[in-house]
């Protein structure tokens, strides 16, 4: 006997708490098991066989999740853009609710336990993937995978990237929902038997078996990534030098092509929030001072010094004062500096760039951000959106997308050729294809320069750190996330964090990074995991629609046959 279709009131009661539960799985709360429970709640909230109603429930679940998850957008702009972005992302979860209603009507899916869970997971991840691609290049914030950076399930990123991790989370959450449903049936049937139900009343044994089976399969799915051969270091952690200084080993025992010694500078700003870059000279000077601090103990011992996005914010190629400052700092530390800056070409617009600056030589390497953030770094539909909010005019010059690969070559201080950095600027760390392209172009280590100053003391920087951790696992590369104001971090190839800075503090550190060239299965798979789940989702929805149409036609023919039989019998 199946459970009755849930009432509208019950699904309403489930949708909003379910979204809030999912929010708690992500930083800063970071209780990753909540992601599985939240998916289970969403499964129950979409229990009615009504596509329009489930669209509304998915949308409410999405709003309850995205509004607090993207609170940093409110901090950096105002209320209207924050609500608009959250609403847009929630609409994708609404669409998922409708698609799930149609897909589960397929004859080979209906009432078939683990198949239902598998279809639910495929559809959820397909919508998640589409959300990461459209509109305006997509917005991958809030993918289930990002909550798993510190969980056993997150190790599956080595095998199939964020698609694989999200699939496992969604599948496990749906299994949990099915297990709880089986337990409810057991309780109901047991109570019915005790009240004197008929002798042929259903026995609870089968439902107990279903519940145990679903929970056991879910546990396997969560834990099986632990057996994957993710490169794990035995040497990672803080190391004291003979001089008594502390440096950080990001897994030197995993090196395949040598090691890169890097300094990193988090210069900080004087005013958190919207006014963080009112004094550009202050930001530049803070990072110059941090570089001189490194020079006191490590002059001539570093291969590169890493600055964050907008560490200068002024183009040293056109500003002689900035160029002179960089020359002096680079000469003092004895290494080139990877500087975050802005370029303003004569043709208009601007580029967000990471420039490798060498004393007395200037720029010897360059990467321009490929994926400017829509509405943050450029404004699509500016004239239309100005009607709703004047915040669009805060972006006075639209950013241009770069076309060069996301890598920068750093010359070895020992004259052993060059080391290749994968340079992924700020929000680009959320886009799998950009990180993957860096590794395919030969990146031996990942560097994520970012500027989190305008987001204040929100969870934006720690959410970004979770993404950097998962991308380290996906690519099998050590990584450094370096921010203007924090959180900056050193990450090993298995996603572990060995050094992390605080928010709105000035800090410097030195890290020994293993250079690696092996390619993980996730990188080798390329776009295929996303393409496959997308194609399967389309096929499942079509099968569900066709199945429903066929069932209705069959019912109509049976009704007509019954009517004819009744007429002929008169």
Image (tube, grey):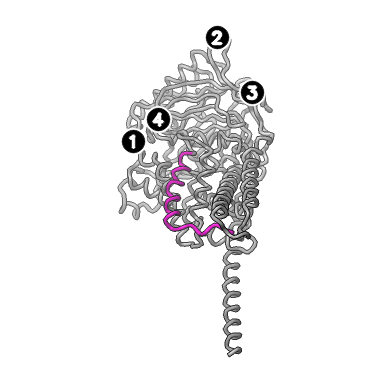
- Whether residue 198 is visible to the viewer of this picture, yes or no, is yes
Pick out the residue farthest to the top: 243
Instruction: Determine whether 213 is above or below 450 in the image.
Output: below
Which quadrant holds residue 550? bottom right
Return the x and y of residue 81 as percentages of the image width and height. Answer: 36, 47
Return the x and y of residue 491 as percentages of the image width and height. Answer: 56, 29
In space, the residues marked 4 and 1 are separated at their CA atoms by 25 Å
Image: magenta residue range: 1-24
In space, the residues marked 1 and 2 are separated at their CA atoms by 41 Å
Kindly identify which numbered label has been placed on residue 243: 2
Q: Residues within 10 Å of mark 2 (few under 14, many from 20)?
A: few
Tag 2's secondary structure?
Answer: loop
Q: Nearer the viewer, residue 63 or 420?
A: 63
Tag 1's secondary structure?
Answer: loop
Quadrant that contains the N terminus = bottom right
- Ranked by sequence position, the earlier of labels 4 and 1 is 1
- Ranked by sequence position, the earlier of labels 3 and 1 is 3
In space, the residues marked 4 and 2 are separated at their CA atoms by 38 Å
Pick out the residue farthest to the front: 196
Return the x and y of residue 12 as percentages of the image width and height. Answer: 42, 53
Q: Nearer the viewer, mark 4 or mark 2?
A: 2
Kindly identify which numbered label has been placed on residue 252: 3
Kindly identify which numbered label has been placed on residue 274: 1
In space, the residues marked 2 and 3 are separated at their CA atoms by 20 Å
- Ranked by sequence position, the earlier of labels 4 and 2 is 2
Please give the residue where the numbered disc 4 appears in the rendered image: 319
């Amino acid at each position: 006997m199946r459970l009755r279709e849930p009432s509208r009131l019950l699904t309403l009661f489930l949708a909003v708490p379910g979204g809030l539960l999912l929010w708690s799985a992500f930083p800063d709360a970071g209780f990753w098991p909540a992601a599985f429970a939240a998916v289970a709640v969403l499964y129950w909230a979409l229990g009615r066989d009504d596509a329009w109603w489930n669209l509304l429930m998915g949308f409410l679940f999405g709003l309850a999740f995205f509004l607090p998850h993207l609170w940093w957008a409110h901090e950096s702009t105002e209320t209207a853009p924050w609500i608009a972005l959250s609403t847009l992302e929630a609409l994708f979860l609404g669409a998922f609710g409708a698609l799930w209603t149609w897909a589960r009507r397929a004859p080979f899916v209906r009432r078939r336990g683990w198949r239902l869970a598998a279809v639910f997971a495929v559809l959820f991840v397909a919508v998640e993937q589409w959300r990461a691609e459209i509109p305006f290049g997509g917005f991958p914030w809030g993918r289930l995978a990002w909550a798993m950076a510190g969980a056993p399930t997150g190790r599956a990123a080595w095998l199939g990237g964020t698609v694989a991790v999200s699939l496992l989370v969604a599948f496990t959450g749906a299994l949990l929902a099915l297990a709880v449903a089986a337990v409810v049936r057991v309780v109901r049937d047991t109570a019915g038997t005790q009240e004197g139900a008929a002798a042929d009343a259903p026995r609870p044994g089968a439902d107990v078996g279903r519940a145990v089976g679903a929970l056991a399969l879910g546990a396997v799915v969560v834990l099986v990534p632990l057996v994957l051969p993710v490169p794990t270091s035995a040497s990672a952690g803080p190391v004291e030098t003979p001089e008594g200084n502390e440096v950080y080993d990001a897994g030197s025992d995993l090196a395949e092509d040598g090691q890169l010694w890097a300094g990193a500078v988090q210069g900080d700003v004087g005013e958190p929030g919207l006014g963080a870059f009112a004094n550009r000279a202050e930001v530049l000077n803070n990072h110059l001072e941090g570089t001189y601090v490194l020079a006191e103990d490590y002059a001539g011992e570093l291969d590169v010094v890493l600055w964050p996005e907008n560490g200068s914010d002024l183009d040293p190629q056109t500003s002689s004062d900035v160029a002179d400052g960089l020359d002096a700092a680079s000469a003092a530390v004895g290494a080139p500096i990877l500087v975050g800056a802005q370029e303003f070409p004569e043709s208009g617009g601007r580029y967000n760039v990471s420039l490798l600056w060498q004393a007395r030589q200037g720029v010897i390497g360059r990467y321009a951000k490929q994926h400017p953030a829509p509405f943050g770094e450029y404004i699509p539909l500016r004239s239309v959106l100005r009607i709703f909010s004047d915040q669009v005019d805060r972006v006075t010059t639209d950013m241009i997308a770069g076309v060069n690969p996301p890598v920068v070559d750093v010359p070895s201080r020992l004259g052993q050729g060059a080391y290749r950095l994968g340079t992924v600027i700020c929000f680009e760390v959320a886009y799998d294809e950009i990180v993957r392209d860096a590794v395919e172009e030969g990146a031996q280590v990942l560097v994520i320069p970012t500027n989190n100053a305008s987001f204040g003391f929100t969870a934006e920087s720690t959410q970004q750190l979770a993404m950097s951790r998962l991308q380290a696992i996906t690519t099998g590369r050590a990584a450094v996330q370096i921010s203007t104001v924090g959180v900056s971090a050193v990450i090993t190839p298995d996603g572990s964090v060995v050094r992390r800075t605080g928010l709105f503090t000035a800090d410097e550190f030195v890290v020994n990074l293993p250079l690696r060239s092996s390619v993980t299965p996730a990188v080798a798979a390329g776009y295929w995991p996303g393409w496959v789940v997308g194609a399967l989702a389309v096929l499942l929805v079509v099968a569900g629609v066709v199945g429903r149409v066929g069932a209705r036609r069959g019912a109509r023919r049976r009704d007509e046959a019954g009517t004819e039989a009744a007429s002929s019998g008169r």
